[in-house]
Image: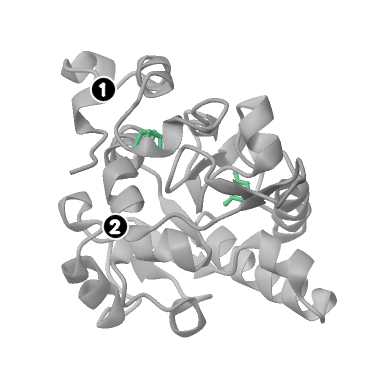
Amino acid sequence: SPDAEPFLPETPEARSDLDALREAAAGCRGCHLYEDATQTVFGDGSPGGRVVFVGEQPGDQEDRKGLPFVGPAGRVLDRALEEAGIERGDVYVTNAVKHFKFKRQEGGKRRIHEPPNAAEMRACRPWLLAELRLLDPDVVVVLGATAGKALFGSSFRVTKQRGRLLPLPDLERIGTPAAGREIADASPEGAGARIVATIHPSAVLRAEDRDAMYEGLVDDLKVAASALA
Ligand code: URA
Ligand code: SF4
């Protein structure tokens, strides 16, 4: 079955080196998504960052530029970060899936985003886990349902979990239903790393009531910021 694992660097030294991971990910053929995309879009940001943002997958512009969140959704995220008081130097952004999945508009050139399926998310998970192990963040911000399902299994619901500081499950359990149960039952007290779920910034762009959606995003990011203070 599709799996990125064979493409990860072998040595623990290389696995704890962000550049070595990024270089290895550039050659990943762990699932079929590399075939039509331009390039792997690995995470980017401050290696010392205390907050890791996990999105869904690169979009059209990210695919062209090779960097996450540099398109319209990224601009919403940047603005919301600033408003929530989260500093850029504290942030690393990445995606649950590292290649752009799309279909071509009939007869046109436009590439339409398609959500990754469960097998693709599972295949790509070793990269996300390697990033989380290496960065060891204080807070993981989960952007939207796809990222939530990638981390906590298919029972994850953003509407239910958003805007609360929850304990980050053991990385060994990430992606399994056990991780989903763990956060569903969690009380916000206790030590250790945290997760905060919120909507995907592109949902703001699609919403009828953009202002309310945006304010909700900022409020959730303020909850993440409170864990850093
Ligand atoms: N949407 C995402 O989920 N990730 C990106 O990098 C860009 C848009
Ligand atoms: Fe590898 Fe992930 Fe790209 Fe699939 S989407 S080829 S698993 S990097």
131, 8: nearer the viewer = 8
Q: In the picture shown, does residue 183 fall above or below 168?
A: below
Q: In the picture shown, does residue 97 fall above or below 41?
A: below
The spot of residue 57 in percent (x, y) is: 52, 47
Which mark is drawn over residue 49? none
Q: Name the residue carrying label 1.
A: 15
- Compared across the picture, whether 11 is left or right of 7 comes to left
Which quadrant of the structure image shows residue 69? top right
104, 217: nearer the viewer = 104
Q: What residue type is labelled 1?
A: Arg
| Quarter of the image that includes the C terminus | bottom right
Which mark is drawn over residue 192? 2
Tell me which label, 2 or 1, sits earlier in the chain.
Answer: 1
Crowding at dot 2, Cα within 10 Å, few <14 / some 14-19 / many 20+, comes out as few
Which quadrant of the structure image shows residue 26? top left
Q: Separation of disc 2 and disc 1 at Cα?
A: 23 Å
The spot of residue 62 in percent (x, y) is: 65, 36
173, 194: nearer the viewer = 173
| Quarter of the image that includes the N terminus | top left
84, 94: nearer the viewer = 94
Which quadrant of the structure image shows residue 80? bottom right
The spot of residue 115 in percent (x, y) is: 50, 58
Q: Which amino acid does label 2 sit on?
A: Gly
Identify which residue is drawn at 29% across, 80% down. 184
**Callout in the foreground (2, 1):** 1
